[in-house]
Image (cartoon, rainbow, N blue to C red):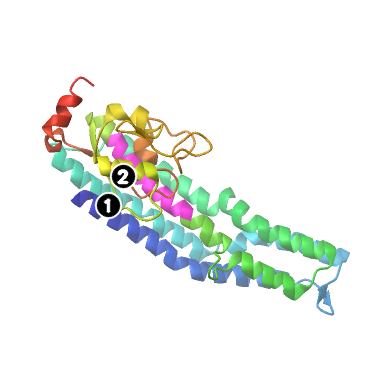
Amino acid sequence: MEVYDDLIAVITEAETAWESTLTASEKALFNNVLDLVKQLDTKAGDIVVSTKNLRTLNKIKRGLDAALLTDKYLKNISEFVSFYSVTDKVQNKYFSSLENNFTPPEITNQIRQQAIDDTIESLAGSGVKFEVLTPVRDLISTNVTTGGNWAEMVKALDHIITSKLPDEGRLRKYTTQIVTDAINQYSRNYSQTITDDLGLKWFQYVGGKVQATRPLCNALVNQRYVHQSELPKIVKGVVKGRQTALGKNGLPLGQIPGTNATNFQTYCGGYQCNHHLIPVSEISVPKYLIEQFKDK
């Protein structure tokens, strides 16, 4: 579908743009943390266990937020969330082809702002601080209170912060999942809001197949057309009467906890899923399928 190609192009551009900032963000964070720990007193290469260093440790802890949340990092977040309105334009163009005189419902503005606020919180709030800064803080604390080797501590900090093949740094690993899920879920939620407003009941499950594509997504791409009435079974992993693989939580592999028939269009295959359940006009659906679902 052309709309899907255009939408994925925008999403990919947003993800790539974020990815391109991470090497610089990692370097800035590591250098800023290094400047903080250079304040510690050492002797023969080891950190001195002293009241002074414990006071310095408290100062270092207070400085970690600023070490990550630089003006450049915050600007990168702002540039990323600006892509949300670009995905809207692509989808509005598509819905205009389905509905004469189409106008997005007013609530979509609130949905966009909420998505932006949530993304900023994830990338600059408690989430990133817990995932990235907590292990940095804990490592420094342990070395200060036990008199660890300064050089070994710096090496360990470098390992936590900086990506080196085959390992990803904590910042890259955490934020790449956040941006992928955030923009995909936002664009799908936007689509679902309009779908509900227009009362559309037919969809196409679209997206490429790769080695890591989940069984549920594979099955739905193969099925192609999906009727709204099928969603209660689909969220249980059943596609065309066949059960796809389930995880330990009883949901299809990779599914986000809490996924149900109502929000499946937003969550689709789960974490880091790039597939979309695109609403389509009934005119484009094969007649034999329409007949099968005419009373549903």
Look at the image and give the residue range highlighted in magenta.
177-194
Residue 87 belongs to magenta span? no
- Which mark lies nearer to you, 1 or 2? 2
Horizontal side, residue 100 vs residue 53: left or right: left
- Whole-angstrom CA distance, mark 1 to mark 2, is 10 Å
Q: Residue at x 36, y 50 (%)?
A: 274
Q: Report the residue marked by disc 1.
A: 7
Q: Quadrant of residue 192?
A: top left
Rendered location of residue 189, percent (x, y): 35, 40
Rendered location of residue 187, percent (x, y): 33, 45
Rendered location of residue 292, percent (x, y): 18, 25
Nearest to N terminus: mark 1 or mark 2: 1
Q: Tell me the element at label 2.
A: strand
Amino acid at dot 2: His
Q: Report the residue marked by disc 2.
A: 276
The one of 5 and 87 positioned closer to us in this rendering: 5
Q: Is residue 133 above or below residue 158?
A: above
Q: Residue at x 42, y 67 (%)?
A: 20
In the image, farthest residue toward the bottom: 44
Amino acid at dot 1: Leu
Pointer 2 local density, CA inside 10 Å: few below 14, some 14–19, many at least 20: many
Residue 189 belongs to magenta span? yes
